[in-house]
């Protein structure tokens, strides 16, 4: 039973959650937050692209028929059209570049510390979470985008799209306060909420919307160890989670052995709309992210590797915050000795399979001095920014990054 703070009246903001609506089945639910003339145009553009793709498929079929019926393939005009048809990709609108973002003010990139935060002191673990809207890049060559983020106990990652992890021990009581923009500097102009996958509470009461400036408070007990997702559950939830509102909630199991280093990596997708504007709901629905990043910024740990030591025991806490793409988490040059995920405990693991919202911890040592990339082994996703590097202190120069 969650202990609900007497001052808090979450029922004021209580509403029925409708995840179906967020998946695009009820377009009217999308209207308040996102329906602008630009987005309507974009929707029609997507419809247009879809029709173009359909036409391309027809052309492709005609081409194949022509190929199998023609004796002289090179002379068949339809064979010229076929390669173009193969590249038709509805929904794949290219992301605006930094050069296309002239006049848009945005935060300077700031590398996110990958060291796992400590469990807060005290018998009860207190988390004061605040919401803020900000404009930041999530990839160095692409246009800045509006990101909606959580600040946790005063820590906020300006200059990236990440939100901080919260870390507790199994069995801890969590005292949680959510403020939807504590000051005007947080620039919140929409309702938001927070859904803990690690809590066992009534979602209708605890995960309901808060109007800008409002707050809620309750307690819950973290009885299940694991690496959980937290996220905004406000409609359309696809947009809110795709605009940055996700993070990692770690519940360390009882009796967890100490290791030399604990790191965290949240895999997260970004769908860039107009430079400096909201995330692109069309791309979100089409599952066509422009960027897939660890800890809110493409390739940040490739450009500046995470420093580690040869032979030390490393535990990485990994979350796939999605919202829509699977993760195949892998560290090149090692094998995970021990893995704890939603899928169970395992030894001798090369790659961890994480559905959107799933997380886990992986343990390993790096036996040689060197540079060890960590990636999603879904390489079409990795090239969008889901690549980092662990580099030992005396790694040979000129290798890797
Ligand atoms: Cu939200």
Image (tube, grey):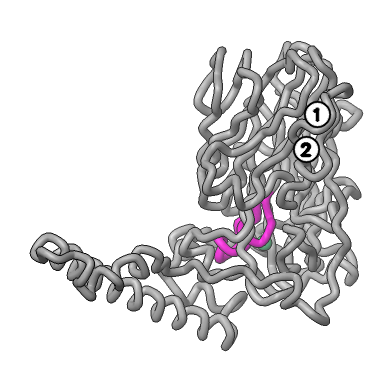
Q: Quadrant of residue 65?
A: bottom left
Q: Is residue 330 left or right of residue 219?
A: left
Q: Residue at the location (82% across, 25% down)?
A: 396
Q: Quadrant of ligand 1?
A: bottom right
Label pair 1/2, CB-CB below 8 angstroms: yes
Nearest to the eye among marks 1 and 2: give it: 2
Q: Residue at the location (18% across, 63% down)?
A: 64
Above or below 40: residue 25: above
Q: Residues within 10 Å of mark 1 (few under 14, many from 20)?
A: many
Q: Quadrant of residue 14?
A: bottom right
Could you tell which of marks 1 and 2 lies nearer the N-terminus? 1
SS at circle 2: loop
Q: Residue at the location (60% across, 30% down)?
A: 330
x, y percent for residue 260: 83, 16
- How many numbered tags mark residues here? 2
Whether residue 319 is visible here, answered yes or no, is: yes
| Viewer-proximal residue among 139 and 33 | 139
Whether residue 168 is visible here, answered yes or no, is: no
Residue ID for mark 1: 391
Specify whether tag 2 is near ligand 1 (CB below 8 Å): no
Specify start and end residues of the magenta stretch as a single range. 231-246
| Viewer-proximal residue among 100 and 152 | 100
Q: Disc 1 and disc 2: Cα gap in Å? A: 8 Å
Is residue 317 on the magenta stretch?
A: no
Q: Quadrant of the C terminus?
A: top right
Q: Residue at the location (59% across, 45% down)?
A: 382
| Res 401 label | 2
Q: Quadrant of the N terminus?
A: top right
């Amino acid at each position: 039973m969650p202990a609900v703070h007497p001052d808090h009246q979450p029922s004021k903001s209580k509403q029925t959650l409708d995840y179906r609506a967020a998946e695009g089945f009820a377009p009217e639910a999308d209207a308040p937050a996102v329906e602008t003339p630009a987005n309507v145009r974009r929707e029609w553009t997507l419809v247009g692209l879809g029709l173009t793709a359909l036409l391309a498929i027809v052309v492709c079929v005609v081409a194949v028929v022509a190929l199998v019926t023609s004796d002289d393939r090179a002379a068949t005009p339809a064979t010229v059209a076929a390669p173009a048809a193969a590249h038709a990709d509805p929904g794949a609108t290219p992301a605006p570049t930094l050069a296309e973002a002239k006049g848009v003010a945005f935060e300077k990139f700031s590398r996110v510390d990958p060291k796992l935060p400590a469990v807060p002191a005290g018998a009860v673990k207190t988390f004061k979470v605040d919401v803020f809207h900000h404009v930041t890049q999530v990839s160095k060559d692409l246009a800045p985008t509006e990101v909606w983020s959580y600040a946790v106990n005063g820590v906020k990652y300006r200059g990236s799209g990440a939100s901080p992890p919260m870390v507790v021990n199994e069995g801890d009581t969590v005292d949680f306060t959510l403020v939807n923009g504590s000051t005007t500097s947080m620039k919140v102009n929409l309702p938001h909420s927070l859904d803990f996958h690690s809590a066992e509470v009534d979602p209708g009461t605890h995960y309901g919307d808060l109007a800008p400036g409002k707050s809620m408070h309750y307690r819950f007990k973290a009885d299940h160890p694991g690496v959980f997702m937290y996220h905004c559950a406000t409609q359309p939830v696809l947009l809110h989670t795709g605009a940055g509102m996700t993070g990692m909630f770690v519940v360390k199991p009882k009796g967890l052995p100490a290791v030399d280093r604990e790191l965290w990596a949240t895999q997260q997708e970004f769908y860039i709309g107009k430079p400096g504007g909201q995330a692109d709901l069309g791309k979100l629905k089409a599952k066509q992210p422009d960027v897939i990043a660890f800890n809110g910024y493409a390739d940040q740990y490739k450009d500046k590797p995470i420093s580690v030591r040869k032979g030390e025991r490393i535990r990485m806490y990994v979350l796939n915050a999605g919202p829509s793409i699977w993760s195949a988490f892998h560290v090149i040059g090692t094998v995970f000795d021990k893995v704890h995920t939603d899928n169970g405990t395992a030894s001798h693991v090369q790659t961890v399979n994480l559905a959107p919202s799933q997380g886990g911890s992986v343990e390993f040592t790096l036996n040689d001095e060197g540079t060890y990339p960590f990636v999603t082994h879904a390489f079409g996703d990795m090239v969008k920014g889901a690549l980092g590097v662990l580099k030992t202190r005396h790694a040979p120069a000129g290798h890797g990054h």
